[in-house]
Image (cartoon, grey):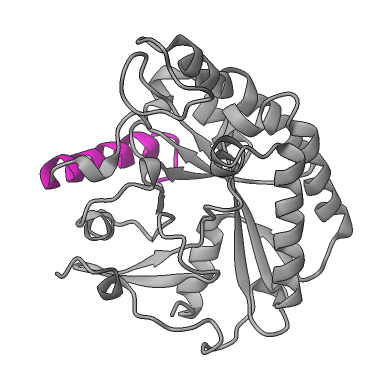
Amino acid sequence: MSHKAEVRYPYRPITDRADYDWPEGKRLAIYLGVNHEVFDFGGSLGAELAPSQTDPDVMNYAWRDYGNRVGAWRLFDLFDRLDLRTTALLNADILDRCPGLAEACRDRGDEIAAHGRTNAVAQGTMSLSDERSMIADVTQRLATLGVRPTGWLGPWISESNDTPDLLAEAGYRYVLDWAHDDQPTRLATAHGGLLSIPYSQEINDLPAVIQRHQEADGFARMIRAAVTQLLSESDRRPSVLGIALHPYIMGQAHRVPALAGILQELREANDPRIWWTTAGAIAEHVEAHDLAV
C-alpha cells in the first residue's frame, strides 16, 4: 500500500456529504477523552513543564505522575457530580504501576480505550513485528478489565506506516490519531475499513496549556467557542467535538474550577442538540447506520 495519506482517506469537503442525526435527533456529539498515562523515570519521552536541567528529571517526572496520584481522582469527582462518562484512554502499564486507577475508570462506567503500553515510547518508531506484538499485548491486558477495547489512541499520536492496518487486523473498530475532520471518516486498511473518530489537537489541554501557554480560563473559553460554532452549523450537518484532557494538566487544583465551570454551564443549558457520549458510542452508531464518509 502507498504511504500517502490520501490513500487512507479520500478528499471530500464537509459541505458535500449526506446529512444524518445522532441518536434521538441530536446534532453535536461531545465526548471527553481522558489520557491516563505513565512515563519512565530517567530518559525517554514526556511533556515538560519546564526544560530539564539534569537526568533523572525529577521535576517533570513528578509533575506528570501527579495526574495519576491526585489529578485523575479530582476529575472523577467532577465527572461524577456532572454525571459524565468519559472515554478513558489507558496506557496498559497503568494496570501495574497505578493499581486501582484503571479499575476506577471501569467502575464509574467509562469506556475503556487503548493508548499503547506507555507514553514513554512513540509507537511510530517500532518495527512491524514489535508494533503488532505491542498492540496484541495492550489489547489482552486491558481486556482483563472486563471489556475488550475497540478504540485506539497512539502514544504521542504516533503511527508507523502500518499502524491502521495492524489495528484493523487486531479487531479495532476506531482510531483517534487523525484530527482531520469534524465527522467520523473511514480509513482504508489492508483488513477493511477502520473508523477515524475526531479527537481534537486544538481543544486539548496539552498543546493549549503547555505549548501555547494558555491557562485554564482560556481553555474553557475555547471549549465554549467551539460548542457555540458547531451548534451554529448543526442545522446543516452533524459533528463531533472530542475534548482531550490530561489529569496532570487539567487535574491541577487551580485549573479544575474553570473546567468545572464550562462543563456545568453546558450541562445545565441542556441543549437538546447535544449528545454527551463516548468515542466508542459514536463509532457504534456510525457503524450501525453506515454513516462514515
Q: Judge whether residue 233 is colored magenta.
A: no
- Residue at 29% of width from left, 68% of height from top? 5
Quarter of the figure that contains the N terminus: bottom left
Nearest to the observer: residue 166 or residue 245: 245
Compared with residue 236, is residue 96 higher up or lower down, i.e. above or below? Answer: above
Q: Nearer the viewer, residue 147 or 66?
A: 66
- Which residue is at 59% across, 86% downward? 19
What is the quadrant of residue 255 in the picture?
Answer: top right
* 133 within the magenta span: yes
Residue 52, compared with residue 255, is above or below; it is above
Q: Give percent across and percent down for residue 211.
A: 54, 39
Say left or right for 262 vs 110: right
Quadrant position of residue 24:
bottom right
Q: Main secondary structure of the magenta part?
A: helix
Image coords of residue 110 (percent x, y): 58, 43
Residue 190 position, x and y percent, is: 19, 68
Please state which of residues 186 and 14 is positioned toward the viewer in this rendering: 14
Q: What residue occupies the far right of the structure in this picture?
A: 268
Residue at x 49% of width, y 64% of height: 283
Quadrant of image for the C terminus: bottom left
Residue drawn at x 56%, y 35% as measured from the top left: 210
* Residue 34 image offset from top left, x and y in percent: 56, 41
- When the figure is inspected, residue 7 is found, relative to residue 129, above or below; the finding is below
The boundaries of the magenta stretch are 128-148
